[in-house]
Amino acid sequence: MFPNLITIKENAIFIADSHHHSLYRNTLDKFFQSLLLLPRRQIFLMGDIFDFLVGDISQCLKDNQKTLNILEQLALKHEIYYLEGNHDFLLQTIPAFKNIRCFSIQSQPICCFLNQNKVYLAHGDILLSWHYRFYTMLIRQKITIKFLHLFKNILYPFLINHLKKKTLKESSKDSSHFITQRILNYIKQYNIQQHSYIIEGHFHLNKNLNFHTMNYIGLPLFACKKKYFVVEYENNYLSLKMKEF
């Protein structure tokens, strides 16, 4: 399940859940433009970067073309990894992403190395209930995409209007209990080693927790406070530090 292990390097950037849309919630253009000015580094886009971006639906590509152009420029300078979420998927077919390494939900979590420890990266919408797994499978089916194409003049505006009105906020759930259960699920499903890291978005947790020698990082919701993580060198180790744009 974990081919082609990636070594996470100093100054790597992690961003999740920006829920960007060029027409109504532009959270990314200025941030991506600022990254163009930086020396080459790794950028991990941890899913739900766009509020609705599906590779086989041309209208959403057209709506976000300006941002896609910036991201295409960014990929010429930086090493970009894009883990699809539940708002952005079927990404491999997008022309602007030809220099971006995309990971489908089926290939998540992806396994990397940091300080000689394994790091498991996922958007976060894995290891959930059977009905959520069914939903993630359904929205990616060719027949679903064809149905949306067939009635795009009605369904697409309805979908965008629904997303536009949706309130985005950080999770208020009992995150310590929730994170503990996430760690246990990972251990059970993937038999991960001690001192490993799990890094996820999706849940808008903005919280770190150590449990059973496992290090869990629940990434913040970039859409609200422009928070992201950067890998920095400290005390002879690489560690993740939160930043704000």
Image: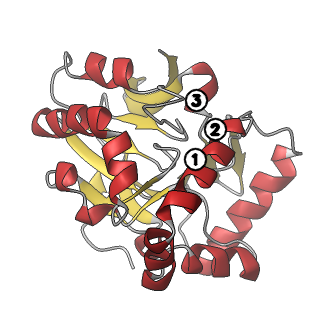
Q: Which residue is mark 3?
A: 223
On screen, residue 150 versus residue 93, left or right, reads right
- Cα distance, mark 3 to mark 2? 13 Å
Q: Nearer the viewer, residue 118 or 49?
A: 49
For the N terminus, the quadrant is bottom left
Mark before the other along the chain sequence, 1 or 3: 1
* Number of callouts: 3
SS at mark 1 in the image: helix
* Residue 237 % position (x, y): 39, 32
Q: Can I make out residue 200 in this image?
A: no
- The disc placed on residue 164 is 2
Identity of the residue drawn at 37% across and 52% down: 59
Does the residue at mark 1 contact the one at mark 2 (Cβ under 8 Å)? yes
Res 164 → quadrant: top right
- The disc placed on residue 18 is none
Q: Name the amino acid type tagged 2.
A: Lys
Q: What coloring was used for the rendering? A: secondary structure
Identity of the residue drawn at 38% across and 25% down: 232
Identity of the residue drawn at 71% across and 37% down: 165
Q: Name the amino acid type tagged 3.
A: Ala
Single out the residue that lies furthest toward the left. Answer: 76
Q: Name the amino acid type tagged 1.
A: Ile
In the displayed structure, 178 sits above or below 221; it is: below
Q: Which residue is mark 1?
A: 160
